[in-house]
Amino acid sequence: MPPLAALALPSLSPELLSFFATHGIVSVEDFLIRDIYQLPGLRAADSDKLRKAVTEVLAFLENGHASWRNGWDLFNNLEHNIRFLPTGYDSLDSLLQGGLREGTVTELVGASSCGKTQLCMQVSAHVAVRFGAMVAYIDTSNSFSSERLEQMLNDLLNSQREVEKTGAFMQALKNIVCYRAFDVYSMLILLQKLNTSIENHSQKTHSGRLRLIVVDSVSSVISPILGGNISQGHTLMMSIGQILKKLAVDNSIAVLTTNHTVTGESGNFKPALGESWKSVPHVRLLLRREIADGIYVASLTKHSSQACTKEAAFSIGRSGLQANVNHE
Amino acid sequence: MDSLTLPLPSSLRSKLLEAGFANTSAFQHLTPLQLARDANISHQEALAILKTVSWMNCADQYSKEEDILSSAKTAWDLLCYEKSRKKLRTCCSELDTVLGGGFKPKELTEICGVPGVGKTQLGMQLSINVQIPSEFGGLGGQAVYIDTEGSFMVERALQMAESMIDYLKYATSSCESTVGLGMSLNVDTFLSHIFYYRVYDCTEQLAVVNSLEEFLKEHREVRLIVIDSVTFHFRQDFQDWALRTRLLNGMAQKLMGLAQKHDVVVVLVNQVTTKTNGEIVPALGESWSHTCTNRLILSWSNGCRQVHIFKSPSLPAATASFAVSADGIRDVESSKRIKLCTISSP
Amino acid sequence: MHILYVRGGSKILKRALREEDAQSPRYSTQGGRKGWVGMEEMQAWVCPDETARAMLGRVLGHRLPSLAPTPPLHRLSLRPGHVVEIVGPSGCAKSEILIQAAVTCILPREWKGVTFGGSEGLVMMFDLDCRFDILRLVHVLQCRINEVTVRHASQDKEESSSLPTTQPSQLTVATVEDTNELFKACLKRFYHKCCYNSFEFLATLKTIRPQLQRMVEDHEKALQLVLIDSIGAYYWLDRACQSTLPVASDSYRTLSLQVVFEAVVRELRQILQTHPFLLIASKGTIFSSSTRDNPGNRDLAHFGQKEYPERLCEVALNQEFSNEQFRYRTTTEKPSKQTEKMSHREYMPAVWQGFVTHRIVLQRAHGSASEVTYAVDKTLIIKAQWERPFLRQVDKFIIEEGFIKLI
């Protein structure tokens, strides 16, 4: 937030600004925190000017932020503008009531090698092909493999003719942009830059707008700094959560993140990153490997608008997640 | 970016926030004197803050770009790179097939197994194989071997190097153009291109990993980093488990960054431990399982050594057998053949 | 209030009178008179002002109506001016309770002959978590409307079956259109705003009054309910702004959790003066219970070689929630060494704690489905207990379709 002087509002005269400065009110944050009308040393003659100044600053703030929306507008917006992005696996889509919803943050939690990265890549492939939309894939553990994407896309584009197929294939791959971030500061800079880039990029429509952001995975960059003497760990974690939510809600983008598991009580696994991170995702999917080899189960453990009672079983094949295939 | 999220001591951060500098754009153009005056801090503190901000701007690959959506690498570019990149082969064709051609650069691969199954042997074989010249389809690079247990035996490396040279000479003898190349290889070159570190505790291990950035800048030929083993110093005498997790995760992320930036193969050797129910699992806990890109589990099966791909983003789960012979890591059949030959010869 | 000092040896009689009492014809307008007062005056003071019945009639006449809350808030009568805090870990239906309260508020008392039992007021929601889902609100609203209309239609049918002249089919067609109209009218009474940090929240609070005036005039309804989900959303971000250095007494510029919430409470109080409303705020738990998230615990050697510290995080959440064991410790900033029985740890600053008038604590019932057990056939059962004022009864409830059902 800028200092008050930089707002250049007509009612903020230099005398008023210096009066504010004597009381330590220099920036807009100070203005918000202090009770302006209770400042000592205010002369009666100046109270009108003060009221005018306060009204103008508040009007400036009101314009800067989104306004109140009533339920009917929200509902209409949801029906007409918000889409569900398919994951590529029908059972999972029906579990999520259609897929990943734009404007929400979905989290995949699972033990090692449970199919989280596979699902992330599969969703990216499907969104890039079916919507022609851009996908931003943020990779923190060098797990993003274009060759694997190629395998998944081959099956998806199988139905098309060869000539169209190559073009569609190349276009789909060009719609997916890949970023690497290996520590929390790079990730923060990246997300902030993405935020500013999105508004500029929406004017260029050659590759469709950004509909999906995948972060694989958040816990890799946060677990080295969380806990212990580093007090900044939680702050950085919640800053990342705040930016992800902002990216999702303000721009109607679906955000998919992965989280690891840590050992909880009596050998059970529980999501990493602690209790505070649980307030970030709208939807949480728990992936686990069944004892029988090759079978995985996805269960819904948190959803903002439906009960979490369902599960979907899958196995991982060439084309990604698919219905259970009996192995010999 | 936000002042809240700068990697500074909390006292400096709070002083910045009190002065009203909520964002780096508000003060990064100021001189240290101006910043010291505005934020009511000392000159040294102002210098430290500006230095951190400029370091973050330089070190981060994305901070300079205006529109990162347009200038980013797409999956198509990455596919072209992936199809053309050379992979680090072991001398076992079954293993190479299952790995999709060999160990891939820019990825962290973890090798776990019970003691004596051949992890160190594999590590040493890779240190030799990374030096295969590009004319023979190898990476033509050098290796860094970080030894924490003292299991690296120079004599064994010498043996493997000699056997590799014999093989390469044999391979080139039929082809005129590469005969000369084959003749120029010698064991001294092979051994001198393995940079060996011996670390004795966890602090040294972390210090060596931190210093690798500078090392790799100077030695641009390095294409392989092996840490054997990553577990040894973190298992005993480490009381604070949360600290251990943080340190290991931090180390893994640094290695990821190095692998990505310098295009190296990183191989980490891990041990195994027994859970309370008797099950044998890789050591270092659940949080470590998520850090590496690939995980290979070595085990014994019917008297044969096997590699099982447990975790990989691009490879299907598969198993391959390999053998450890006098020449190094080889296919099972070939080593059997060699055995038969030695038995039958008088 | 009256302060009456009569000292045996002293000749000072001191009276402190409130303004309203001073204007009442019964009391002398001369305040603070020194010296002995006459017996008549003392007798007049000791005499009762009014009977209890007269007082009840007066108070009820002036009092703002209570809002019909949904379970588990049903045990206490909540009225505008109260501040209710719902505390619980993630996944305990806090947002669900807020949505149920909102739906009760936006439904009309009676509409086209059908009694819905709502308060027909405006609801404003500050979504600090930014996770509000309009689909859930719509679903709950539809369930409520359907349940009432079906009940009403079946009652009508019973009545109309006894009369020969009514046509039931026409009645149902009209009801469907009316239902949509009612649905739209209800949704329009619900207002929502997302805030991403404390300053946006404060800016919204400061700029709300003219907008609120407009809304009240448009709808001709009063603001009855304000929801905040959740009040602890910016805890870590605001805490990081805090100066770790000793603060000079005249330093106005220190940003901290305390200062931000002083401003929040001040603004809310000012809005309460002109538009009395019931405030319900949800608050999540920040520390899961003991170890990893707790900055106070570092050396974990005493937990044994094989024990992972993360395991202990589940201990407190799975504790039996019995009345005798229920304890809490109120701390503001850093929690000290915890006990395993603790199920609610306070982290909000004192100014907010003083503002809250009611607090209810939620917890997953032991043995119900949790994130750790992968049992999908188990229903989520949640326990609720009022902490302020402290009530011994523990309510259990489940969420079924659009309703919260007590079990």
Image: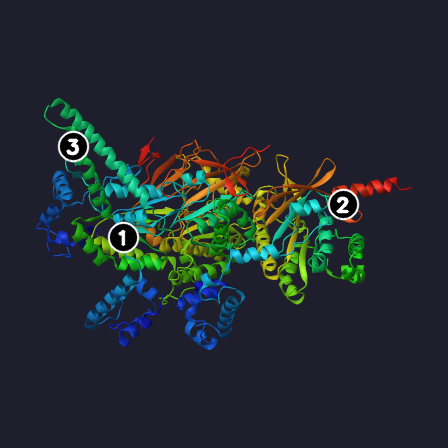
| Colour scheme employed for the rendering of this structure | rainbow
Give the residue pinned by disc 2. B324
Asked if marks 1 and 3 fall on the same chain, the answer is no
Q: Amino acid at mark 3?
A: Leu
Q: Looking at the rendered structure, which numbered label has been put on residue A69?
A: 1
Q: Looking at the rendered structure, which numbered label has been put on residue C171?
A: 3
Q: Position of residue A160 (x, y in %)?
A: 47, 46
Q: Position of residue A308 (x, y in %)?
A: 41, 38
Confirm whether residue C12 shows in the render.
no
Quadrant the C terminus of chain A occupies: top right
Which mark's residue is nearer the viewer, 1 or 3? 3
Q: Nearer the viewer, residue C100 or B194?
A: B194
Separation of residues labelled 1 and 2 (CA atoms): 70 Å
Disc 2: CA contacts within 10 A as few (<14), some (14-19) or many (>=20): some
Quadrant the N terminus of chain A occupies: bottom left
The residue depicted at 28 percent of the width and 65 percent of the height is A60
